């Protein structure tokens, strides 16, 4: 059907270890087409980048010990949360901070699930937009001789190349939200995807000017991908097909474009 | 591919008028299958329920006039926002309120785009979960003799009926978010869909207990559907196929289950 969107889980990914090339692992398991958006779970990106920490090796500060006592959390975990954050926004019941990247989330995005060893936790990637660019480059490199490949297509693919050689990458993580229960996936990094679609100044179907519609495309892509992953936490990536109009030749601004500047944020 | 998700735009919907049965209009344009989730834009539901208002017929209060002056908004619009709200949370630059339903959003969800007449605005449905239940009943009724139909299937469909006779309905609207730029669609109403998937107490892939993972399924479904609608604001509905495991025989708790109780909300 025209205008259809498909979300395909990437099956059979191995346990990712520090130093692994996530883009190569994905490219070996899916037939990508030009215009595809590959959505990768933050967890595997962090693992590949060696962002797993052993709690026993963390030296908690006095503040972390006091806060941990009050919140019923391990002081070592609290210490990591504080060291990954530029500001603590709430410390009642839960710890909501702004990370050094500028993300507002619980526990600075540090997570203890789906890790191979007890006593370890996983931090967010240092620079998720940069991670997305690297994974995108790996996908492009791996796809160079495939049917969605670039200019030096060797001719082994179909006679008519697909619309564009580009694929995009989103790195997704689940964040809690103000006002609403449950977590939704958002894009913490992206490359080759237009992160926001700004309709301000454009017209609606009836010719009236749209006043304040800016669509968080990258976050909605992350949310869509999560729907094929939740059934099995062993599926750390998905391909979203049908959004070629948002895929760009350049890496673009990244998910940093989705962070609301603190000065414009009324809820802190 | 197993585990694949598809999002199909519902094409060819007419301009919806007060009194129209939205479920019938959709059922006439798509071949639904058991387990499908039909996502309908709030705007068409509101139109069908006669929630369009003429600003010239609104009598603004003194407070609305003062607030309108300060925010550069029409006093009549502000009056409607106030009358649709139980509490004003922010009135700097924009008007963020909690609606009578309990949604926190800009302008109480009142919207001026995609309406047939100038000088009109559109309010949210009075009870979006009830709207979703009604649309679901219309879809079930319209599908009674179709292949995903119920017990009195006349045999015209395939020999083996699909897994379940149920379809679900989500009513979606785009809300701004704290901390992040851009709007994302959320579920303001739903019927027949498990709105939250609570993994607390369940195990991760490595056997470790997941501590705080509750997935906002209905909101992510709304976001996924928006990705096929943004290209053309004339597409007010989409079908999300592949989530039958979240579709229930009962109408269920509705999207009210996604509202964070004010007492548990740290950001107000």
Image: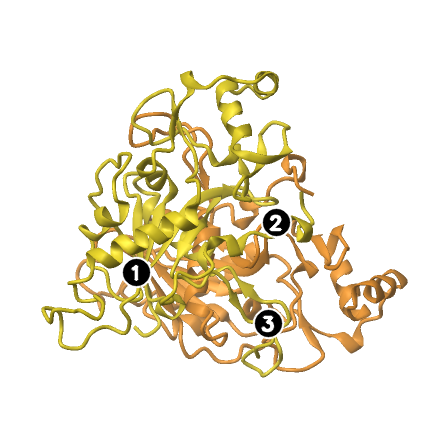
Chain colours: A orange, B yellow
Please tell me whether mark 1 or mark 2 is closer to you in this view.
2
Dot 2: element: loop
Instruction: State the residue at coordinates (19%, 64%).
Output: A158
For the C terminus of chain A, the quadrant is top right
Instruction: State the residue at coordinates (26%, 49%).
Output: B23
Disc 3: host chain: B
Please tell me whether mark 3 or mark 1 is closer to you in this view.
3
Residue B86 image offset from top left, x and y in percent: 59, 36
Q: Residues within 10 Å of mark 1 (few under 14, many from 20)?
A: few
B42 on left or right of A16: left
Disc 2: host chain: A
Residue B201 image offset from top left, x and y in percent: 60, 76
Q: Residue furthest right?
A: A62
- Determine the CA span between mark 3 and mark 1: 50 Å
User: B97 or B134, which lies in front?
Assistant: B134
User: B261 or A222, which lies in front?
Assistant: B261
Picture layout, residue B227 above or below residue A227 = above
Pointer 2 residue: A178
Dot 1: element: loop
- Determine the CA span between mark 1 and mark 2: 48 Å
| Disc nearer the start of the sequence (1/2) | 1
Disc 1: host chain: A
Pointer 3 residue: B200
B123 on left or right of A64: left
Residue B147 image offset from top left, x and y in percent: 17, 67
Q: Say whether mark 1 and mark 3 are on the same chain.
A: no
């Amino acid at each position: 059907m025209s205008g259809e969107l498909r979300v395909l889980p990437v099956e059979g990914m191995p346990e990712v270890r520090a130093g692994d090339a996530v883009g190569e692992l994905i490219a070996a398991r899916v037939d990508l087409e030009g215009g595809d958006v590959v959505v990768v779970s933050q967890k595997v990106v962090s693992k590949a980048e060696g962002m797993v920490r052993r709690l026993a090796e963390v030296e908690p500060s006095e503040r972390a010990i006091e806060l941990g006592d009050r919140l019923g959390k391990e002081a070592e975990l609290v210490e990591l949360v504080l060291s990954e954050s530029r500001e603590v926004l709430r410390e009642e019941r839960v710890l909501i901070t702004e990370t050094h990247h500028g993300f507002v989330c619980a526990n600075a995005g540090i997570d203890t699930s789906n890790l191979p060893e007890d006593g370890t936790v996983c931090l967010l990637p240092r620079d998720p937009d940069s991670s997305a660019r690297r994974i995108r480059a790996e996908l492009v490199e791996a796809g160079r001789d495939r049917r969605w490949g670039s200019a030096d297509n060797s001719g082994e693919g179909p006679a008519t190349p697909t619309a564009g050689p580009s694929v995009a990458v989103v790195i997704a993580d689940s964040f809690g939200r103000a006002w609403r229960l449950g977590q939704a996936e958002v894009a913490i990094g992206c490359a080759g995807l237009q992160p926001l679609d700004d309709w301000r100044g454009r017209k609606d179907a009836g010719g009236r000017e749209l006043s304040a519609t800016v669509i968080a495309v990258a976050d909605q892509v992350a949310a869509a991908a999560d729907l094929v992953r939740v059934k099995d936490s062993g599926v750390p990536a998905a391909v979203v097909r049908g959004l070629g109009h948002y895929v760009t030749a350049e890496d673009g601004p990244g998910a940093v474009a989705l962070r609301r500047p603190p000065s414009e944020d009324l809820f802190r």
